[in-house]
Image (cartoon, coloured by chain):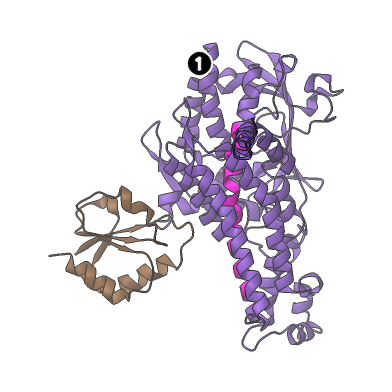
Chain colours: A brown, B purple
Amino acid sequence: MKVALKYCGGCDPGYDRVAYWEAIREQAGGRIAWQRPGDGGHQAILLVCGCEKACPLEDLPQGKKILTVKHDRLAPAEVVARLLGRES
Amino acid sequence: MDRIVTKDDYLKSLREQGHLVYFNGERIDDVASHPAFRPHVNAAAKTYEMALLPEYEELATAVSHLTGERISRFTHIHQSVDDLIKKVQLLRAIAHETGSCFQRCVGWDALNATYMTTYEIDEKHGTDYHQRFTQYLKYIQASNKMVVGGMTDTKGDRSLPPHQQKDPDVFTHVVERRQDGIVIRGNKAHQTGAANSHEILIMPTQFMREEDKDFALVCAVPLNSPGVVQIFGRQTNDDRRIHSPLDAGNAEYGLVGGETLIVFENVFVPWERVFMCGETEFSGLLVERFATLHRQNYGGCKGGVSDVLVGACALASEMQGSAKASHVKEKLAEMMHLTETLYAGSVSCSAMGSKTASGAYYPDPLLANCTKHNVTRHVYEIARLAHDVAGGILATMPSEADLRHPEIGKYVEKYLAGVEGVSTENRMRVLRLIENMTGGTALVESMHGAGSPQTQKVMYGRLGKLDMKKKWAKNLAGVE
């Protein structure tokens, strides 16, 4: 599955967004091919935001399957499961 | 170099430009490598580095309204309230990485203030300043050069207007008008980041009257132009970064911005780089706009710097076993309250921003002034609380050389130890960081950067709508 990774700007994040995504990537292993949003052809977007505001959400194209995380309390394995669930 | 993209590009561009900088009585050949300048260079370089990181690009880059190209946000003209808010968010994010000033906001604010004002000068006078400036802006956006915004003149006798000064050069002014351009002479003081910038965008330092026409000047000058000399100022404990990095506290990024006194000794400026020349009635407007845009920033950058300081104080208290004391928790909470209050000011003046005739967006000036005014107070209070939490060791701690000394190092290790499992060196590092962020130069910058408190108080009289306030009071009091 191809998933585009998008971060918020990180003005005052409540957790380490990059470390969290790296844990998600590790969990996903070869099941997810990560790419940039501009690359196209992805089945889902993982939007990693530092707080509840999730600034980029308003600007992302509608119709894409967007999974937004606003904290790191969700287990990385659960994030992967939710992403893979959007493939179908 | 056509375009600066990476940190290496930036360092190379500084080495290539060959600008004239002095520090401590010496000519500095390479500011990118000299230990007195390196922390400031690193901090400015962070603005280039973060633009390349996916986790920051949302804030650190923008799309140019002139070309449609993705550019550094530090060269962007604000196109919406959202852009104004993103500006403040970006400053906070970078400050988390540097713990000090990263200098590029001042040029950014000068670009925006000039963009708005040249549009209105042209509307009134039929000049072509805005078109010239737009061309210059395209060049800056494409090259990604670092611009310093040059507003403050040394001003000599403050009781006299520029034309009555014994030495008129205490204000930057036009000394000759030629067919192909102008020749300027004078100075700009407190120029943050100038030693490691490429260009200066010169603006008038204050409202100018008709008789001070030659001082109503906006123009862009490459800092390696013949006749431009920079003299770098001293900062608190600046020799520590040369001799003992641990004692510097933040050896990688220094403290505050690093400022120069810039001298213009008969510098030629071609007309295509002149954006105001004698239109005195717009000088005050430009000053107010630059000041507002710059004051907008302070809750962002100082908020971010204060976040780091709060973290350092929390670490220091953990390392010395006082973290669970209720008074320490209360002081950390107070520091966070003050920090968020600063940030709230910057966000609010951005949220209440409006569109100017040029299409560029502008923060609410009264709220921006309040934000900066709060910085002149709250940063001192945050520092006072930091000193309280850290303890007297902040002022009495032995040096890195003592820690590393073959004979007495063991005593420093033994007697400066805190809780078990924390090395003395790490404790010293955190305490030095707190010292770096709360002493001398770091605080004075909060007082006077973007204008001294009195300049903010003046704005309340102008923008505070006192007549309406009196009217509301009269209505309720039943006063006819």
Tell whether position B295 is magenta: yes
Secondary structure at badge 1 equals helix
Residue A54 to residue B140: above or below: below
- Name the residue at the left extreme: A88
Query: Circle 1 sits on which residue?
Result: B123
**What residue sits 38% from the left and 53% below the top?**
A55
Can residue B4 be seen in this snapshot? Answer: no
B28 lies left or right of B132: right
The front one of B359 and B102 is B359
Quadrant in which the C terminus of chain B appears: top right
Q: Residue B321: x and y, percent?
A: 66, 84
**Count of marks, rendered view:** 1
Q: Residue B427: x and y, percent?
A: 67, 77
Name the dominant secondary structure of the magenta segment: helix
Chain of the residue that carries numbered disc 1 in the rendered image: B
Tell whether position B3 is magenta: no
Which image quadrant is residue B473 in? top right
What residue type is disc 1 on?
A: Glu
Residue B94 to residue B146: above or below: below
Can residue B358 be seen in this snapshot? Answer: yes
Q: Residue B53: x and y, percent?
A: 42, 56
B169 lies left or right of B224: right
Residue B39 to residue B186: above or below: below
Tell me which segment is drawn in magenta: B289-317
Classify mark 1: residues with Cα within 10 Å, few (<14), some (14-19) or many (20+).
Answer: few
Residue B217 to residue B41: above or below: above
- Name the residue at the bottom extreme: B420
**What residue sits 19% from the left and 59% below the top?**
A43
Q: Residue B385: x and y, percent?
A: 70, 66
The front one of B455 and B471 is B471
